[in-house]
Structure formats: C-alpha cells, structure tokens
Amino acid sequence: MRILGIDPGLTRCGLGVIDVDETRRLSLVHVECARSQAKMGAQFRLRDIGQAIERVIDTYDPDIAAIERVFAQDNLQSVTTTMQVMGVAMYCCGVRGKPMAVHTPSQVKAAVTGSGTAGKAQVQHMVSRILALKTVVRPADAADALAIAICQAWRGDNIEGTRSDSRVSVSLSGGVSAHAELTPAQRVWADAQAAARRSGAVDPRRRTH
C-alpha cells in the first residue's frame, strides 16, 4: 500500500509518500515541503498548497492519505490557517476518491518514537532510521509528513473509505469491517493490520519472532 502523509501548514506544508509491503516494511517514495508566500492573499496561498497536494496525489497515486489533526493553541491565527489547509487537503483527497485518516500529534509521535511527547529532532531522527535513510529529513515539516504516513502504516485506524458512505477499519482484536468493497491494496493492508493486531505487534520493530 502507498500512503501519503500531510503535515498541514499555510507557509510550509509537508508532503511525504511511503510504501508499506505485506510485512509492513516501509520505504520512502517521495518527500517535499510545499510553500506559499506570506505576501499573497490567503485564497492564493491555499490555491498553491492545494495544487501541490494535487500534484503529489496525481504523480504518486497513493492508496490512502493521512493528515495530522490540529489542536487549539495560544496562536489562534496559526490554528485557523492550519485548519484551512486541512480542509484543502481533504477536498483534494475527496475529489480524487482517496480514503483518508486523521491522527493526533501525540499518536504520530508515539508511533514513530514510542513517546507522545517527543521533540521534533527526535521525530526527524526516527523517521530517517525507520526508512533507512542516510541523512535526516529536513525541514521538520517534511519529516513530520513522513511520520504521519508511518503512523498510518502502523496504526491503520480511522480510515474513510473510497466512497462518501463507506468506512474501513481494523479493530484492536484484529477484526476487519468495511461498508464497501475493498481495493486490492486496501485488502492487503487490512489483512496485514489484522494479523499484526491479533499477534499484539503494532510496531514491526517490536516483534519477537
């Protein structure tokens, strides 16, 4: 399965694409940081970010996209613009019929580093290690996008289906449920997730066999 991770941001939006095989091994496909100019109007900045997301989807054809959920912070303006980018990303995926999942920052950090409070440098280091890269991914927004994709590969929950009325999910006990027929890639992913959860192995690095 191919996964697109999106770290939403109006000035910098991280976009990372990874592949996960039937054993849940991960490999890097593409990573970039889409940017918009602060001097431009918000509608044009959102247009540029949206076009970058569309280009990555069209070029690499991910089976699913994952995005990080925004939480309220002291900087209300930052939260507002980030949520606008989330909406643009969801629209891009919806137009192209792509399933989508949303994860919290702590879920992403915990999936990649084992700690929900890890700093950006630790996330960058672990992303490079997990994907067997020779250098640390920079900027942090790009590394975060890959971390979000990795989180989706290993957690695999909260997936919206390929149609507006469908949903695919894997329970903690390993049961698979879907309200629509799964694509071959979704079926491979769901079976791998189910087997891993039945064995109690969420992170392939922690398997004992």
Image (cartoon, helix red, strand yellow):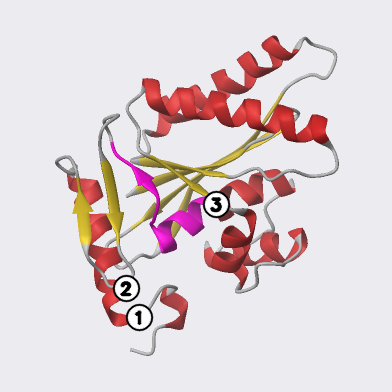
Q: How many angstroms separate mark 3 from mark 1 (CA)?
A: 21 Å
Instruction: Mark 3 vs mark 1: give the one in front.
Output: 1
Which is nearer the N-term, disc 3 or disc 1?
A: 3
Residue at numbered disc 1: 200
Residue closest to the eye, 121 or 68: 68
Image coordinates for residue 125, horizontal then vertical, percent:
68, 65
Instruction: Mark 2 vs mark 3: give the one in front.
Output: 2
Residue at numbered disc 2: 197
Residue lying at 35% horizontally and 38% vertically, measured from the top left: 99
Q: What stretch is highlighted in magenta?
A: 148-161
Residue at numbered disc 3: 148
Q: How many angstroms separate mark 2 from mark 3 (CA)?
A: 19 Å
**Which image quadrant for residue 191?**
bottom left
Residue 67 position (above or below residue 190): above
Mark yes or no: residue 133 visible: no
Which is nearer the N-term, disc 2 or disc 3?
A: 3
| 74 left or right of 196 in image | right
Image coordinates for residue 114, horizontal then vertical, percent:
60, 74
